[in-house]
Image: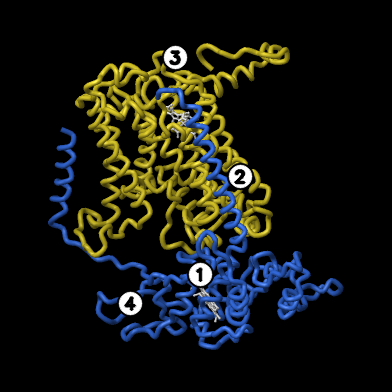
Chain colours: A yellow, B blue
Amino acid sequence: MSGHSTYEPKTGFERWLDSRLPILRFAQDTMVSFPTPKNLNYWWTFGGILAMMLGIQIVTGIILAMHYVPHVDYAFNSVERIMRDVNYGWLVRYTHANGASMFFLAVYVHMFRNLYYGSYKAPREVLWILGCIIYILMMGTAFFGYVLPWGQMSFHGAVVITNLIGAIPLVGPSITTWLWGGFAVDDPTLNRFFSLHYLLPFVIAGVVGLHIWALHVPGNNNPTGVEVKSKEDTVPFHPYYTVKDGFAISVFLILYASFVFFMPNVLGDAINYVQANPLQTPLHIVPEWYLLPFYAILRAVPNKLMGVVAMGGALITLFVLPWLDTSKVKSMRYRPTARLYFFIFILACLVLGVCGAHAPDDLVIPGFSGLQFLDANINSYVWLSRIGALYYFAYFYVITPLLGLTETPLPVPDSISTPVLSHPASAPTGAAASPEKRG
Amino acid sequence: MLRKGFAVAALGLAVLAAPLAGTAVAATTQAEPTEQAWSFDGPFGKFDKEQLQRGYKVYREVCSACHSMNLMYFRNLGQKGGPFYDPKYPNPNDNPVVKSLAHDIQVKDVDTDTGDVVSRPATPADKFPAPFANEYAARASNGGALPPDLSDMAKAREGGPNYIYSLLSGFKQPPAGLKLDPGKYYNPWFPGDLTGSWHGAKDKVPEGGAIGMPPPLTDGKVTFDDGHPSKIKDEARDVAAFLTWAAEPKMEERKSFGVGALIYLLIFSILLWFSYKKIWKNVAH
Ligand code: HEM
C-alpha cells in the first residue's frame, strides 16, 4: 500500500489484470513481500490471531443465524434446538460463544503489547485509534450477542446496561425508550439487537481493513521501538511471518479447542441457561468477564451519571493516549521505571475485573470486618474498585505524562540490526539480542 | 518522585479510614456442593447408560409429578449416547424400548375429526408432557413456589450434578431456633438468607435456605430394574446423572470430537514449529 511495489506480473493474464485492477499486486505487496522487522516476538502474533477470530465469529455466526429465532418466546428454545437437534449445532454454538472470549483475550494481549512497546506513538496514532474503534465495536457486538440467547443474564444484563443511558439528564429516558422500541426490554429490543449483532462484525471487518492499511504505511513497530532503518532490518512477511503467525495461531487454537470441547460453559454464567423472566431478577447481575473492569469502574462511582461518565472516560482515554505520552523512547524495554508502572497497571485492570465480578458490598478479605469509610466499608469491593479506577486514570493522566519527562531511559540501540554492537557496555544483554525468547 | 507520591496517597487513604467503625453485612449463603466421582468427568468421560436408565426412572416416577422437561422428546432417550440407545435402531423412533416408555405416558392431542382435546399414549416423537397446564397451576399446587423446568438444570446451577445431588440428598431437620413457614423445608445447599427466620445467636445463622420443594426422595422410593440399591443417595446420584445427560445430550460426541481435534492441532503445531525453525535458520534476529 505504500513504498515500492515489488510485484512483477508473470503471465499475460496477470499483466492484463494488473493494468485494470491491480488486486494481485495489492495482495503481493500486503501479504507476501511486505517488509517486516525481523525481530518481532510472539506478542506480535496476536494481530493474525485476531483476524482469524473475526473470521471464525463471522462464519459460525452466520450458521447460527440460520437456525436462531429472534423472538422473546422462541429465542431461548431455538438456541437449545441448535445444541440438541441441529447436526453439529453444539460445535457451532460453543465455538461462537467461546470465540467471543478468545477474541477478547487476544485483543487484550494485543493492546497491552501496544502499550508496552509504545506502538501507539507517532507515526502510528491513527493505527492505534482505529484499533480503539475496533475494540469499542467489539464490546458493542459482544453485548448485543449476549442478549440473543434470552437467558436470565441476557435479559437482566440488557436492562442494566440500557438503563445506564437513562442516567443522561433530560433526554436520557427518551433515548432509552427509543432504543428499547417500547417501555421495557422486550421483543422489539431483541429484534434490533439481533440486527445490530449481525451488522457490527462487518463494520469491524471494514475498520480492520483501515487498520491494516494504516499499519502498512509506517510499517510494524518492533520490540526495540526503533524504526526500521534499512533493508537489513526486515524480512518479507511471507514466508517468515506467515509461518511464525501460523505456529502461534495453531497453539492458540489448542487453548480455544480445550474450552470448546472440554469446558464450554466455564466462562459463561450458569443462570443464562434459565430462560429470561422479567419478573425475577438474579441475585448478582454480572457481564461477561471481558467487560468486568469497565463494570467495576461504573459501580465505583456512587452517582449513576458520573459512573457512566467514568466508564466512558476510561475508553475515551485510550484515544488520546498518543498525546499524553511524553516519552521519546517507545519501547519499555529501555524504560525500567515505566515498566514497573505498566505492570501495576495490568494488575489494576485485573483487580478491577475481580471487583466487577463481586457484589460491591462483599468483603475483599473475608472475616476482616473492616472499617466504614465515607459511604462504604473500606474492606469492600467498592473501595477496591475505587483504588483500581484511580490508578487506571492516574496511569494515563499523571504517570504517563510525568514519567516521560522525569525518567532516565536506558541507552536505545541505533537500529534493529545492531542493538548490542553499538552499546556493548550498557545494552541489557540477551534481552535485545534474542527478542523472541522473551515472548 | 511518582513512587513516593503513590505511597503517600495510599497512606492518606488508610489514615482517613481509621476512625470509622465497621459494619456486618447479611448475605445469601449455601453449602459447597459435595463432589462426586462421575463417569462423565474428564476429557474421556462417558455416561453410564445403566445409571441414566435408573435416573430416568427416578425422574419419571418422582420428579415428573412436579417438574417439566420441556426440551426433551421421548425419541431423545433412544438417540446415540442416550440411556436406551440401541445400535440396532439408529432411528430412535423405531426403538421398541423407547416406544413402550413413551406408550406408558398419556399426552394431550386434538381429535382431528371433532376438534376435541383428547388424551392418547405418547409416541417417541412427542415431548415429555408437563405436569401442570401453566405456571399458575404449578404454583398453586406447590405453596406458591414454582418447580423449575429440569431440561437444562444441570447447566443452570453452579456445581451442576454435584449441586443437584447435594440438594436432593441434603434435606435436614431445621436446627432449633429456625422457624420456617409451612411448606418450606430447610436445605443447607439451597441458596438463601435465613437471618429473618432465625431466632438463635446472631452470628450462628444456619447456612443455606428454605426451599419450597418437599424432600422428594426416600430410601427405596424407586425400585430399580437392575437391582441396584436405592438409598436416597443412590437415587439422587442417578437422577443427577440423568439430568446431566438431558442438559448436554451431545457431551460424549463433543468430547470424542475434541480429543481428535486436539491431537490434530498438536501435530499441526509441531510441524509448524519445525517449519518455523527451518525458515528462520539463516536470519539473525
Ligand atoms: C478485530 C480486532 C483487530 C484485528 C483483527 C487487528 C489486526 C491487526 C493486525 C493483523 C496487526 C498487524 C501487526 C500484528 O500482528 O500485531 C495489527 C497491528 C496493530 N493493532 Fe490491531 N487488530 C485488532 C484490534 C486492535 C485494537 C483493539 C487495538 C488497540 C486499541 C489495535 C492496535 C494495533 C496497533 C497499534 C498495531 C500496530 C502494532 C505494531 O505493529 O506495533 N488493534 N492489528
Relative horizontal placement of residue A352, taking residue A248 as reference (left or right): left
In percent of the image, x 42 and y 54: which residue is there? Answer: A286
- What separation in Å lies between label 3 and label 2 (alpha carbons)? 42 Å
Q: Nearer the viewer, residue B282 or B53?
A: B282
Which quadrant of the rendered structure holds the C terminus of chain A? top left
- What separation in Å lies between label 2 and label 4 (alpha carbons)? 47 Å
Q: Nearer the viewer, residue A410 or A270?
A: A410
Closer to the eye: label 3 or 2: 3
Residue beneath disc 1: B38
Residue beneath disc 2: A61
First-in-chain label (3 vs 2): 2
The chain holding disc 2 is: A
Hey, what amino acid is under mark 2? Gly
Residue beneath disc 4: B206
Relative to residue B186, is residue A339 depicted above or below?
above
- Residue A378: x, y in percent? 22, 55
